[in-house]
Amino acid sequence: MIDGITGRVLTYGRLIDGIQRWGAVVQERWSPGSPPPTVGIFMRNCPDYPIIFFGTTLVGGVVTPLNPSYTAEEVAVQLADSGASLLVVEAALEAVALKSIGLLSARGMPPPALFLLGDSKSGNSDLRAMLEDSTAPFAKHVDMYLKMILFALVDVAARLLGLIPFYHIYGIVSIMLKGLKISSTVVTLPRFQPSSFIRALQEHKAISGSKIFFTNLTVMNLAPPLLKFLNESNDVKREFLQSCHTVGCGGAPLSTSSKEKFTNKFGDGTDLYEGKIDRKLGRCGKLLPRVQAKIVDMDTGAALPPNGNGELCLKTPCMMKGYHNRPDATRETIDEDGWLHTGDVAVHDEDGFFSIVDRIKELIKVKGFQVSPSEIENVLLKHPAIADAGVTGIPHEDYGEVPRAYIISSKGSSVTENEINNYMKEHLAPYKQLLGGIKFVTDLPKNPSGKLLRKVLAKTAEQEESLVVENIVPPTQL
């Protein structure tokens, strides 16, 4: 593991030692007969992230990764819901973590034990010192696990760019699990910044000569906005990707034009794919091994033949067990036969290539992140100048979808869009902001019982002429 900002290197030997030592810390705090402890990870991508992740799971603990862009309120909610008893935080996020712990204490909830990585501003010791201490104890009864890790080190693999967040399933599977399993070198970046991204491409591009060292980036997992940056930035040169043989793109739809621009700029030597290398332009690929899928009629539930639009249902060994502490939501998503209903309208052709057409569920998918309209509405309704609010998603070329709010102001209020946006920044993460704009209205579509008619609201948004949102400034951290 290489820190793409500082250049700090964590070898596989030190990685395994750190995993064992953190596992010992988790074991020490696991009382006999009690449920396995849950560890919150509030960090951006760095070489230490897999130590905490795998050290926790090594001894049977549970991991709950937190989005580093979360506010203290959002952190407190996730910690309370997950029942986390330990929280590992990078120094840059210490203030937010301490505020969230204060919120839990004020609400009479037990706060987790705090462990800090880096230089603390409040006097907390640096966990990294313990992880690198050769006298620190190792976790017990993990020989078989370590043999599996060591066995994976037999084959030398690629050098991956670790920019996709490790708290997201995309980053966990594509980089941490897959990359480390085949002993890849991972160059981590804590967040997207043009300068550090370009520097990583330059510093890890191919070197001349015939030495067999993986000093160059050979695989990159990206999201559509990152691919667009590669396509459009004059500072990214063709030679920066001369040794990169595979670029994966996921989390949101990738337009055909983006694929064509990428091929025109960087050539056919780099394989660009969505989900799987078998590809057709405009399709997201075929099923992976051991994955089952079917397209069902949205009214009858009957399986549809090729080229029929319906809901995509999946069944796979790596599928989630359910929503934590939400049995009703689990039953709504996973049926009694074990099929997970994705909420996506999809289609497949005779050759087995799938394509996502639309969304059924009300969730808004912003750059691959699931955003609940009701969560945004609940925050809006706490503002004294807002009498009522409805939120829906609108299409966006780069992000897939973005939230738009329709707001009824309180009587006598003259609240502005700018005031509401500033208020939202204090309460929700950047990707949950109202990037689709705010519309002030006099009423909202509701049924006789007062329930918001989201489909009608979404239809209103589709018909409006002001759907062009390309000029909206994106958040600096998603």
Image (cartoon, helix red, strand yellow):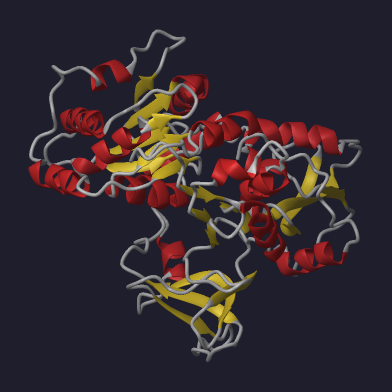
Q: Is the C terminus in the top left, top right, bottom left or bottom right quadrant?
A: top right
Q: Is residue 252 shown to the viewer in this render?
A: yes
Q: Is residue 70 shown to the viewer in this render?
A: no
- What residue is drawn where x is 42% and y is 69%? 331
Coordinates of residue 139 in the picture (x, y in percent): 13, 33
Q: Is residue 395 left or right of residue 94?
A: right
Q: Is the N terminus in the top left, top right, bottom left or bottom right quadrant?
A: top left
**Camera-side residue: 27 or 133?**
133
- What residue is drawn where x is 11% and y is 37%? 32
**Camera-side residue: 86 or 206?**
206
Q: Residue furthest front?
A: 209
The relative height of residue 413 versus residue 242 in the rendered view (above or below) is above
- What residue is drawn where x is 34% and y is 22%? 115
Coordinates of residue 233 in the picture (x, y in percent): 71, 41
Q: Is residue 69 left or right of residue 141?
A: right
- What residue is drawn where x is 57% and y is 40%? 240
Total count of labels: 0
The relative height of residue 124 versus residue 237 in the rendered view (above or below) is above
Coordinates of residue 439 in the picture (x, y in percent): 85, 50
**Camera-side residue: 123 or 138?**
138
Residue 112 lies in quadrant: top left
Q: Is residue 225 left or right of residue 343?
A: right
Coordinates of residue 249 in the picture (x, y in percent): 55, 56
